[in-house]
Image: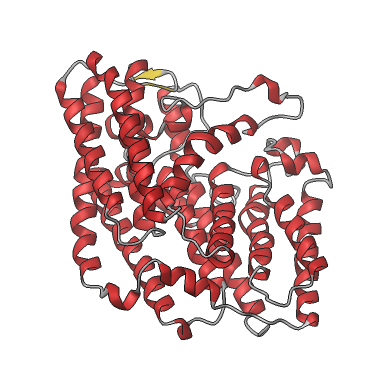
Amino acid sequence: MKQKTLTYISILAIIFIIIFGYKNLIQSPGIEFTLTNLCINVFLIYKLLFTKKNISIINIIYIFILFFFGLSPIYQLDNNFYTWGVYLTYNEVLISNLTIIIILIILHFNTRPLYNKINYNLIGKDKTLINFSKQFNIYINFKSQLLLLLFSFFLFIYFFKSYNFNFINILYRFNDSDLGFNGNATFYLFISYFIRPLIFNTFLFYLFCNNKNYFIFIVLFLLAIVSVFPTGVPRFFAASMYLTFFYILTLKYFKINISLLFVLIIGLIFIFPFLDLFRWVTTDDKISNYTFNLDLASGNFDAFGMFTLALNRGTIVYGSNILSSIFFFIPRVFWPNKEIGSGAKISGELNLTLDNISMPYFAEGYLSFGIVGLLMFTILISYLAFKIDINFYKKIAQIKLISNPIYLISYLNIVFLFFFIMRGDLLSSYAYLFGISFSNYILYKITKNFF
């Protein structure tokens, strides 16, 4: 099925979700919410319907806003906008809708002139990404393949040792106290943000080898799956890794570029809630105690509520959340006043029922410097999306400029990780972005002389 066809099916599904949800808006205390929400959804459907690139950061941003700020609030109205123990007022919700509209206007006008300057004939159509994936016919001698295997194997042993050589500890997201990290946050960050993606992306690199040794292939595959087991890592980290794997397979081996919107709808509606069953269990928990929830009003889609709380009840921290995110690796023993995640901070301030909560990227901007911070964060994300997207597509249009598939792996990692960045919080998402990017840099240095 063609990419455009899947996109059209996805748009129709979204329209159905909107129409079905709008029956709730009969209970809305005012027409303003309905009109502003409709503006948000119509604008985002238009942007996704006429996108120039299927796989891109700007598309990820629009899809995130559509689901978490467009669709989910419609269904949250049934619960009177109940968010982790508090109710949002109608005025607070309306302020959020108007702010989101302002954000969308800035994103549109801040990226449109930039993208319009690009010659898309030079960059090529989406088929260029397929051709780019196919063109890597890497031949690696057996000695180098063996070194790659040993490298990944020793990384895995180090990783496995940190989890007490217990597979159950790896397969589920146990609390640190159950694993033997003993409060050593720096060691935990090193294992989670650097070692795990390095093992997984080593396998992805090997996918591009045309003279594979199938024993080495199977071992690398098993090490990758166990290291980043879907139920044992944060959901958005798993999505970043496995969607990269999925698109490399479909682009290189099946020669198709599947609609990103379609894939993310399947992930958000079905896979995302399913993985929530395994979220932060303890050693004596039973999975049967958890429920599978597809509801767009559930805590899985709390970004709108947390954004609203940040705008209306949050405390401005004047950039301390930014500094704490940039220097996430500094132990608290040396920096006692380092900020905790913004979601946990607001949870403490407002006595919410949960403290392990996300905090959307735009809300982080507001918490940093108020409305000025929100505007700065919006402009920054639009500029970064443009620079990363365009630089990638310009280079793959001129295939000779790129000699290592790590470039494609890194781009896909970043694209899908941006969904996590948009949901937040900033402290966790930046740490993952830094760790994955640095692990890819190390892998590039190791493999650049292999072929």
Choose between 84 and 177: the one closer to the eye: 84
Res. 182 image quadrant:
top right
* Percent position of residue 152, x then y: 75, 65
Res. 120 image quadrant:
bottom left
The residue that appears at 20% across and 15% down in the rendered structure is: 29
Q: Is 99 left, or right, of 65 in this rendering?
A: left
Does residue 309 appear in the picture of this structure?
A: no
* Percent position of residue 147, x then y: 78, 76
Res. 121 image quadrant:
bottom left
Choose between 64 and 214: the one closer to the eye: 214
The colour scheme used to paint the residues is: secondary structure
Choose between 370 and 407: the one closer to the eye: 407
* Percent position of residue 145, x then y: 76, 76
Q: Is 245 left, or right, of 149 in this rendering?
A: left
The residue that appears at 79% across and 52% down in the rendered structure is: 160
The residue that appears at 62% across and 30% down in the rendered structure is: 277
Q: Quadrant of the C terminus?
A: bottom right
From this view, report whether residue 444 is shown above or below residue 73: below
* Percent position of residue 377, x then y: 30, 52
From this view, report whether residue 264 is shown above or below residue 291: below
